[in-house]
Amino acid sequence: MDRTFYVELSTQVVFPLYMDQTASEEKLQETLEYLAIPLKQLEQKFLQDKPFLVGNKIFLADLVAVTELMQLIAIGYNIFEDMPKLDEWYNRVEKAVGKELFQEAHKVILNFQDLNNMLIEPQLKEQMKPRLLKMVA
């Protein structure tokens, strides 16, 4: 997944959530359509018919990729809806790591709203708000 994927995800979806705003339905739909492209590439070009991205055993590439995908899951985007191979791979990765350890490792990402409230003081958040909102306009 390239840098553009993360810029799009951050500016169009995550920043508005972080600033207690909601993205417009139109922007959200455009972003989700854009995000579908690298997800299909991950499924079709990298995963193909293998159990894991690099072959028959879990590898660092699987762990890194699944961590990135957890960001989409955390904001409520069902990335597996039309991608059964990706869903099966995700489940294999979770099983290989161990469900409890997997959930523990992704606890911070999955509790995005809690992290949002913990990390930045309200005054600083208000100071940052105009700049971040300008980025998504």
Image: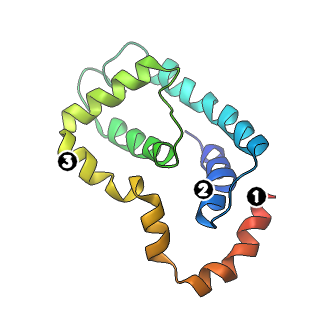
Separation (CA) of disc 1 from disc 3 = 35 Å
Compared with 12, 38 (above or below) is above
User: Which mark sits nearer the N-terminus, 2 or 1?
Assistant: 2
Q: Quadrant of the C terminus?
A: bottom right
Any part of residue 34 in sight: yes
Residue identified by numbered label 2: 14
Residue identified by numbered label 1: 136
Residue 23 image point, x, y percent: 71, 52
Colouring used for the render: rainbow
Query: Residue shown at 62%/48% (left/top)?
Result: 9
Residue 65 image point, x, y percent: 42, 39
Residue sitting nearer the eye, 126 or 134: 126
Q: What kind of residue is marked 1?
A: Val
Residue identified by numbered label 3: 101
Q: How many marks?
A: 3
User: Which mark sits nearer the N-terminus, 1 or 3?
Assistant: 3
Q: What kind of residue is marked 2?
A: Val
User: Which mark sits nearer the N-terminus, 3 or 2?
Assistant: 2
Q: What kind of residue is marked 3?
A: Leu
Query: Residue shown at 43%/44% (left/top)?
Result: 70
Compared with 112, 4 (above or below) is above
Residue 22: mark: none
Query: Residue shown at 51%/18% (left/top)?
Result: 44
The part of the image, by quadrant, that contains residue 115 is bottom left
Residue 113 image point, x, y percent: 48, 62
Mark 2 neighbour density, 10 Å: few (under 14) some (14–19) many (20 or more): many
The part of the image, by quadrant, that contains residue 61 is top left
